Amino acid sequence: MWNKILLSLSLLCCVFGCSSKQQDPPETQDTKNSLVLPDDTPDKPAKDIDSVKYKWLRNGIQMEVYSTEELNIYNDVPHNLMVCLYQLSDNEVLNNIVNVAVGGDEDSREKLLSCEQFDKTIVNASRFFITPKQHNVLMYDREKDVKSILLVAGYDNSNISHILVQRDIPVLFREVGVIFKEEQYSSTYLKMRIFLGKHSIQDLRHGERFEDVENMMDVEPRAGDKMIEDIYMHSAPVVMDVIQH
């Protein structure tokens, strides 16, 4: 009789798993309450200019553009103008192309005007079109790792040195602390003022008024335009912004 009772208990344990340990449910990651930072969240400032990070920045490139009513004039008739914006992670490749184009090579000129990503250092290439007597502000998101930009204006018969504008992404410098001072560097917004004339594009860096520039002769390049061969060799400009705490 006892043997039958023990056999019955054994069968019950096998059926209902009385001797097995219940397993815990698998852990799931709580993504509902996880924090996702936007792409343009500022990084901790770098301690030197060579360690600066260039993150994606919304409206990081801002251009106030003014064009003459005689824009891109041909046979005494003004025309709309295509301008290409190259965002670059490195200057060397385009620097070489510009130098060859300055020497009169038409293939290099056409490559610059193609507005295509023909090299891995071109992070982004985009076109915009300007009409005669236009005055507005254009804003573009700065792509990740972009350290400089190049504007190429699509004038037909102008010298190559008259259709290029290059700028480095500014680096913001701060000095914090009272007794123990610390230097901080971070990339910041690029703000430009661009004048588009009859035959050339000009970068107004020194507070020139658009009206004054428009009244000037638009044939000879400005003094800075003679440095085309070297425009890619400059380091990023530092915006001095000393803050005391």
Image: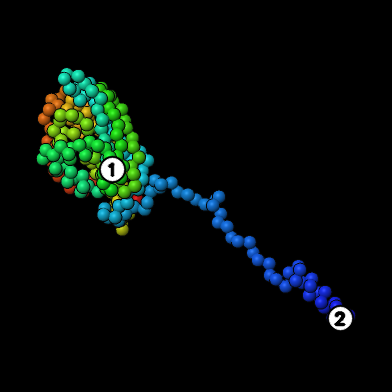
Work out whether 234 lies above or below 132: below
Residue at x-position 36% and y-position 43%: 57
> Which amino acid does the dot numbered 1 rest on?
Gln
Q: Is residue 139 visible?
A: yes
Residue at x-position 22% and y-position 31%: 154
Nearest the viewer among 207 and 170 is 170
Q: Tell me where residue 204 sits by quadrant.
A: top left
Q: In x, y percent, where is residue 41? A: 40, 47
Which image quadrant: the N terminus? bottom right
Judging from the image, what secondary structure is the residue with disc 1 in? loop
Residue at x-position 63% and y-position 61%: 25
Judging from the image, what secondary structure is the residue with disc 2 in? helix
Q: Residue furthest right?
A: 1
Q: Horizontally, is 71 left or right of 245 in the view?
A: left
Residue linked to disc 1: 117
Q: Residue furthest top?
A: 76
Q: Which mark is residue 212?
A: none
Residue at x-position 12% and y-position 36%: 223
Nearest the viewer among 185 and 5 is 5
Q: In x, y percent, where is residue 70? A: 20, 21
Residue linked to disc 2: 2
**How many dots with numbers?**
2
Nearest the viewer among 237 and 77 is 77
Work out whether 147 lies above or below 70: below
Q: Residues within 10 Å of mark 2 (few under 14, many from 20)?
A: few
Q: In x, y percent, where is residue 225? A: 14, 37
Between disc 2 and disc 1, whose residue precedes? 2
Q: Residues within 10 Å of mark 1 (few under 14, many from 20)?
A: some
Q: Is residue 192 visible?
A: no
> Which amino acid does the dot numbered 2 rest on?
Trp
